[in-house]
Image (spheres, rainbow, N blue to C red):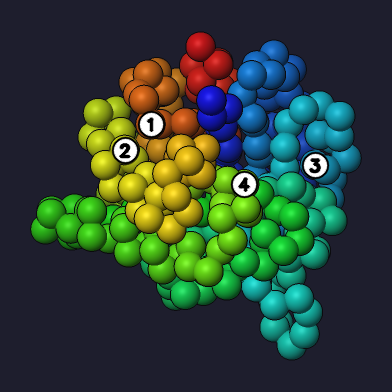
């Protein structure tokens, strides 16, 4: 059985003070649903404070990105071990990183190896753009992102990885995929690509989340599906609605 997983990607929102207030607002609600693996991913600047605030609460902490190198002349970047000082999770290859900061399957692959090497649980984002979706290229794109992004990963480490299928056209647009449509991509395209790399037993253990305009109102449509193991939530993770999403994953 794959344990349900819900992560909140706060993106570039909240100062340290604001982040601390938001955690206080969400904490007791989130703590009720222990069957769900719950993770908050605030900006880097809040990781230190939130790691103290979330200690012994059962709620995990993740970064939204990191560099693959261990240290050195990479101005503005954060190394894996620096993330690991405060976090157990890291989001990699989010479509906003791919679109605005030039990330590719190759850099995602380097980051993935580096994250696993320091004991972080990577949440690896994949998904097609609107143009690719309209051209009928979803399968080709997500399979390539898995085969390239997960290249040369040991099978033993693979079950620790969490995949987030996030069609770019659904992120922040209010136009979520349908539960059935996302499940089809998970079941027919992504899991078989994982099986091609790691074998079907390991592929069956890897959690595949859906992300893209998930709210408390539509979450149950996704969590009712056979191959949707949770959600990566952007906008709604900044509101009490996030608790409703986690509650829905717990059912
Ligand atoms: C995201 O940023 O990963 C995301 C899914 O955003 P939203 O929920 O706002 O669409």
Sequence order check, earlier mark of 4 and 2 = 4
**Residue under pointer 2:** 187
Q: Nearer the viewer, mark 3 or mark 4?
A: 4
Helix, strand or loop under label 2: helix
Tell me if residue 136 comes above or below residue 177 in the rendering: below
* Local crowd size for mark 3, using a 10 Å CA cut-off: few (<14), some (14–19), many (≥20): many
Above or below, 131 against 68 in this view is above
Q: CA distance from mark 3 to mark 4?
A: 23 Å
Q: Residue at x 29, y 28 (%)?
A: 179
Mark 1–mark 2 distance (CA, rounded to whole Å)? 6 Å
The residue indicated by pointer 3 is 50
| Residues at marks 3 and 4 touching, judged by CB atoms closer than 8 Å | no
Residue 62 screen position, x and y as percent: 68, 47
Q: Residue at x 74, y 55 (%)?
A: 119
Which callout, 1 or 4, points at the residue further toward the start of the chain? 4
Q: Could you tell me which secondary element the residue under label 1 belongs to? A: loop
In contact (CB < 8 Å): disc 1 and disc 2:
yes
Q: In the rendering, at what x and y percent does residue 123 appear?
A: 56, 49
Q: Which mark is residue 227?
A: 1
Side (left or right) of 208 relative to 58: left
If you read the primary sequence from the N terminus, does the residue marked by circle 3 or circle 4 appear first? 3
- Which residue is depicted at the point 84% across and 56% down? 85
Q: Is residue 176 visible?
A: no
> Is residue 76 placed above or below 123 in the rendered structure?
below
Residue 180 x/y as whole percent: 25, 28
- Report the Cα–Cα distance between label 4 and label 2: 19 Å
Residue placed most toward the observer, 112 or 212:
112
- Is ligand 1 less than 8 Å from the beta carbon at label 3? no
Residue that label 4 marks: 160
Which label sits in the foreground, 1 or 3?
1
């Amino acid at each position: 059985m794959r344990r349900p997983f819900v992560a909140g990607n706060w993106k570039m929102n909240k100062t340290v003070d604001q982040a601390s207030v938001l955690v206080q607002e969400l904490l007791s609600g989130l703590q009720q649903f222990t069957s769900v693996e719950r993770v908050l991913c605030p900006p880097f600047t809040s990781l230190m404070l939130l790691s103290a605030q979330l200690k012994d609460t059962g709620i995990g902490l993740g970064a939204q990105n990191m560099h693959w190198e261990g240290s050195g002349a990479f101005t503005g970047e954060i190394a894996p071990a620096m993330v690991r000082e405060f976090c157990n999770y890291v989001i990699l290859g989010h479509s906003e990183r791919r679109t605005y900061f030039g990330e590719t399957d190759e850099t995602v692959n380097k980051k993935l190896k580096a994250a696993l090497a320091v004991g972080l649980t990577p949440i690896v984002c994949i998904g097609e753009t609107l143009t690719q979706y309209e051209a009928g290229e979803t399968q080709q794109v997500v399979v390539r992102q898995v085969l390239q992004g997960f290249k040369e990963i040991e099978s033993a480490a693979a079950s620790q990885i969490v995949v987030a299928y996030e069609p770019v056209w659904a992120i922040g647009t209010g136009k979520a995929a349908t539960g059935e449509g996302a499940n089809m991509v998970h079941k027919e395209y992504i899991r078989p690509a994982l099986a091609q790399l790691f074998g079907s037993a390991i592929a069956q253990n890897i959690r595949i989340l859906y992300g893209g305009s998930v709210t408390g109102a539509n979450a149950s449509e996704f969590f009712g599906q056979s191959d949707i193991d949770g959600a990566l939530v952007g906008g709604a993770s900044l509101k009490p609605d996030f608790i409703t999403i986690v509650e829905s994953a717990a059912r």
